Image: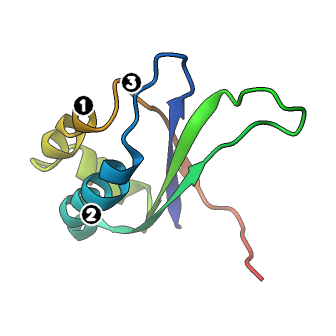
Amino acid sequence: MPHHVCAFYPNDDDLKLDISYYIKTHMPLVQEKFGPYGLKGWEITKFGPNADGTKPVYALQTLLIWDNAECVKKAMLSPEAPVVFGDVANFCNKQPIAMGGDVLGSTRV
């Protein structure tokens, strides 16, 4: 069953986030290191103000698309994981909040 992991970067006042580095350097690194473990793709969403104009709780979300939950476990325990997670300091001064789950349904038109 497909599995998604979402990483949410908090929209704190002191957030420093180099989105260009994140997209052009970090995410290709993630794909290179975790692709062999079943990472199929990723998407990044930058959040703007809420509908009422208030600041969103999170600045950015990354969606990692995996073959299944077991693939995530193998990647997180792999020798490549410290390389991927060690790169976070190169683009952000905050650690993301991560959550994962099995995909129960989806559609795209």
Check disc 2 and report its element: helix, strand or loop. helix
Camera-side residue of 105 and 19: 19
Task: Indicate whether 37 appears above or below 47.
Answer: below
In the picture of the structure, the residue carrying the numbered disc 1 is 89
Are the residues tagged 3 and 1 within 8 Å (C-beta)?
Answer: no
Mark drawn on residue 28: 2
The location of residue 25, given as percent across then percent down, is 25, 56
How far is the residue under mark 3 from the one under mark 1? 8 Å
Looking at the image, residue 77 sits to the left or right of residue 95; the answer is left
Which numbered disc flags the more N-terminal residue, 2 or 3?
2
Q: Which residue is mark 3?
A: 94
From the viewer's perspective, tell me whether residue 53 is left or right of residue 10: right
Which residue appears at 39% of the width and 24% of the height? 94
How far apart, in angstroms, are the residues tagged by discs 2 and 1?
16 Å
The answer to which of 36 and 73 lies nearer the viewer is 36
Position of residue 54 relative to residue 108, above or below, is above
For badge 2, the amino acid type reads: Pro
Quick one: which residue is furthest to the left in this view? 79
The three-letter code of the residue at mark 3 reads Lys
Q: Label 1 amino acid?
A: Ala
Residue at x 72%, y 27% (from the top left corner): 55
User: Few, some or many C-alpha atoms within 10 Å of disc 1 (few <14, some 14-19, many ≥20)?
Assistant: few
Question: Who comes first in sequence, dot 3 or dot 1?
Answer: 1
**In the image shown, does 30 or 5 lie closer to the viewer?**
30
Q: Is residue 44 left or right of residue 20?
A: right
Instruction: Return the residue found at the far right.
Output: 52
In the rendered image, the residue lying farthest to the bottom is: 109
Element under label 3? loop
Task: Return the x and y of residue 98 as percentages of the image width and height.
Answer: 47, 36
Q: CA distance from mark 2 to mark 3?
A: 20 Å
